Image (tube, grey):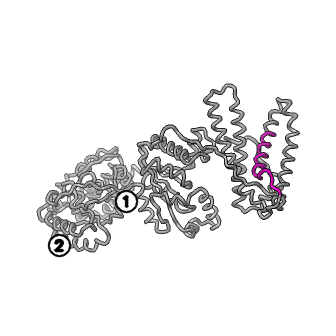
Amino acid sequence: MTQTFPPLVLPPGLAGATATLQDKDRRRLDDTITRLHTVNGRLWDTEDRVRGALLTAAQVADCKREIDQLNAERNALTERADEILGTFADAGRADAPLHTETLASVVDRLSVLTLRIWHSERASTRDELARRRVPALHRQREELCAALDTLVADALAGRRRLPVPARFKLYGCDDAVLAEIEPSRHLRRVVAFGGLSECGKSTSAEFVRRTCGAQRLKIGFLLRQAAHREGLADPYALSARRQAELLLGELNRFADAHVDTGLFTIESVHDDASIAELKQLMGDTLQIVYLDASFAVRVERSGMPAQAVAAKDEIKMSRGAHQVAALADHVIDNSGSIAALRARLRRIAAPPALARLRVTTPYGLGLPAEVASATADFTDAVRAYGPGVRLAALTGSPGEGTWIPGWSDLDLLVIAEHEAHGRLHEALERYRTTLDGAASLGPTLVTPGEVTARRLTPRLAFALHQLQQGRPVLYAAPGTELPTITRDDLNLAAVRELPQVILTTRRLRADTGPRTLRQLYKHLVLACRLLLREHNRWETGPDQILAAASRMPGLPAFSLPSLAEIAAAWRDGASEQVLKQVTAAIDQLLAWYAAELAA
């Protein structure tokens, strides 16, 4: 609601006393008193509204609920103001007379009196009684301001003691609901970030959004949305259980409206009680991440004075932020490298799953006998290395059953712990020796940590996707976990990889010669495969990929021999005519691509 009533002006004595406070306390007090005055204005309006003669019983109930919430908020703000104003009293004068009310209670009365004067002045144009009351109300305000300044002076001098400010109100104690709320089926995973000031919550949530496609949400935003929907003035006055139910309700609504999202992050977890209740409601769907870092590290990273970070910590700790660590599913020491943090975050946001892989022998891949035999020897050696090696597979044409002797490479993928790589190098050298030139070996060595942290090149991601779709592997250790690579992941990877492929293709085209035929052709196929993915079209096999690309809007059809014919010409040393056809197709593609992206 937009404030239309006059601001609250403090009397000079109190204003002078607040000016002596530390900057942090003064800002906190100014904010609290401003909010208290705003709440009193809203409370006045709501109490006027509930008296409407045409309201239904349901509307009256809604107004009463809002009044209760505003009263709870008013009470909490008054107590918060007294936490600071109470420091004016000289605690050492136990013999001083006790005043009947706190300083914030008098400020609250001054706020209400300010509103009464304003409403009376507005009504005086049509109500004679209200007009007569206005001068008396102004005298009341002057007397109250003088009395408040006297009380401030007496408290500062130790001539008066102030009562304990706690009011022990019971607003919002009975928040039970009839039915237990459950997470929506579209709410597949929620990562909640907690921690003290400048620990990296926002940076981490943004990384998960950018790399995993998560939707970032703030807990405060969700609670405000729920409060608006439920007609609540202050959702923070509710019990922790009710706050958790409101949060889950808003998450469910958001997930149901964005069914393709599934992954959400919420910040900032500063209340240990409400997040514990939310965890009870959501179970493992909610993953609580507490980011820990020393005070010195947080100050250095923030670029702020240590006092500012400490002040922010104090506020968060007063709400229980530091106790979230005991509830967290993951406590991450964020004092180390960004690489370590991001690896943990990727596993939390998109955890790896137990891989269901189809294992076959090299003899079932359509390879020549000598190549299959050499591959079998390598597989036996890998298997003997034990759990340090997790997976070995021939990707690309061997897995697709389109391997061509003298043309195709052996693209080998091995997932193994770094400690096993020394022995793998020896096994790879024996593999090459045994092949004796029958095929060119292209190994890719990657660690399990790199894979589960999704530190993957686009080609490696595509290879893993193919394995998960049923392409065979040579060896897989029991319990091997792999990240789930979806078509959406590959479509996004295609957008990122295509520019590099185009640049490499142009470089190869500038250096065209008989020796570059294979590279030119393979890059033509790869570029077309990536372009087709951008159009959500999936083809396998070079001939099928090039035929499908020829039907793309505006791209002239390629005039190319089949892969078998190109490979035969390459082997027979008669590649001159084929090279002209391949370079012509590349020129068509590059010209089309440049025109498509022209401004």
Which residue carries the number 1 mark?
Answer: 454
Q: Which mark is residue 433?
A: 2
Q: Does the magenta stretch mainly form a helix, a strand or a loop?
A: helix
Q: Amino acid at mark 1?
A: Arg
Q: Position of residue 126 (x, y in %)?
A: 82, 29
Answer with the quarter of the image where residue 198 lies.
bottom right
Report the magenta residues as a range.
97-117
Q: Position of residue 106 (x, y in %)?
A: 78, 49
Marks 2 and 1, how far apart at CA: 33 Å
Q: Callout 1: helix, strand or loop?
A: loop
Q: Which mark is residue 133?
A: none
At 43% across and 50% down in the image, what residue appears? Answer: 283
Work out which residue is located at the far front of the displayed protein and give it: 95
Q: Position of residue 139 (x, y in %)?
A: 88, 43
Q: Earlier in the sequence, mark 2 or mark 1?
A: 2
Using the image as rendered, state which of residue 133 and residue 530 is in the foreground. 133
At 24% across and 60% down in the image, what residue appears? Answer: 476
Task: Examine the structure image and report whether residue 113 is included in the region drawn in magenta.
Answer: yes
Name the quadrant of the N terminus: top right
Using the image as rendered, state which of residue 557 and residue 546 is in the foreground. 546
| Residue 268 appears in the figure | no
Relative to 392, is 122 on the left or the right? right
